[in-house]
Image: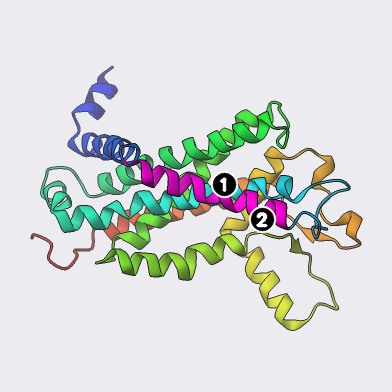
Amino acid sequence: MSIQNKHTSDPTWQAAWMLAKREWIRFFRQPFRVIAAFGQPILFWILFGTGFHSAFQGGSQGESYMAFFVPGTAALILLFTAIFSTISIIEDRREGFLQGVLVSPAKRWGIAVGKTLGGAAIAWAQAAVFLVLSTLIGLVPTGPNLAILAVFLFLAALALTAMGVCFAWPMESPQGYHAAMNLIMLPMWMLSGAFFPIPAASDGMPTGQRILQTMMQWNPMSYIVAGIRHLSTSAEQLGVGQTSGRVDWIPTMQASWLVTGGFALAMILLATGLMHRRQKGELQ
């Protein structure tokens, strides 16, 4: 009880909790942001899933592209929601709200924790809704893996939201943030095995394809997508590429946990470090 009272009376934890709560309320009070963060990945899933169905040769016998694209769409929902939630950092700075938080008794790491937890909770909720809908239409099998998937989704949401905080904090305008999103975040998703399977390295692979394959293997997003795929796909469907005469690369579940957890920790620490750097126009 004394520990709980200590945390509830700590101004840093109070600031973190209020910032997280504020992100949740603020996000769902703007229906267009909810539709954009949730609807656009769903639209991609429907359009690409139906359009590429006949040309898809990346999965097991009889697997549709819509089923293959489910983990990638869930990861895209996490990424889009992280982008839409962390852009509020720039808005709060321009409106003067962050100035009040920065001069309060709360320590700066509370800002990083609050923004990350608030955005991650929103991202997790939207991705979970999508996977529940996928389960209802039979694209994701039911079973005990769904509970583990919920935990993994939240870890991935923490990692991507903390990454969004790292990009948003130094930015002075939403335009700069969107430029970083288009240059780094979206290519990370496209090179993650979400859109098409990652080929395994081979001796006869051209140099350009080998470089691309290496980038995909070193991409943290690849392990997020692979973790979701392991937990939302039946064992038969994980034989990716075997029926098309090609062997594809997919990280193990253990590697997905380790890399995603390490990526989340690194991004949270980096976001906390960036919070201690004074920005232009900040009160001393």
Amino acid type, mark 2 = Phe
What residue range appears in magenta? 30-51
Please rate how many residues cluster around mark 2, counting C-alpha atoms within 10 Å: few if below 14, some from 14 to 19, many from 20: some
- Residue 43 included in the magenta stretch of the image: yes
> Dot 1: what SS?
helix
Nearer the N terminus, badge 1 or badge 2? 1
Dominant secondary structure, magenta: helix
Give the residue drawn at x 79%, y 57%.
56
The location of residue 124, given as percent across then percent down, is 48, 38
Label 2 residue SS: helix
The quarter holding residue 246 reads bottom right
**Would you say residue 82 sits in the magenta stretch?**
no
Quadrant occupied by the C terminus: bottom left
Residue that mark 2 sits on: 48
Q: Is residue 219 something that shows in the picture?
A: no
Comparing 111 with 9, the one in front is: 111
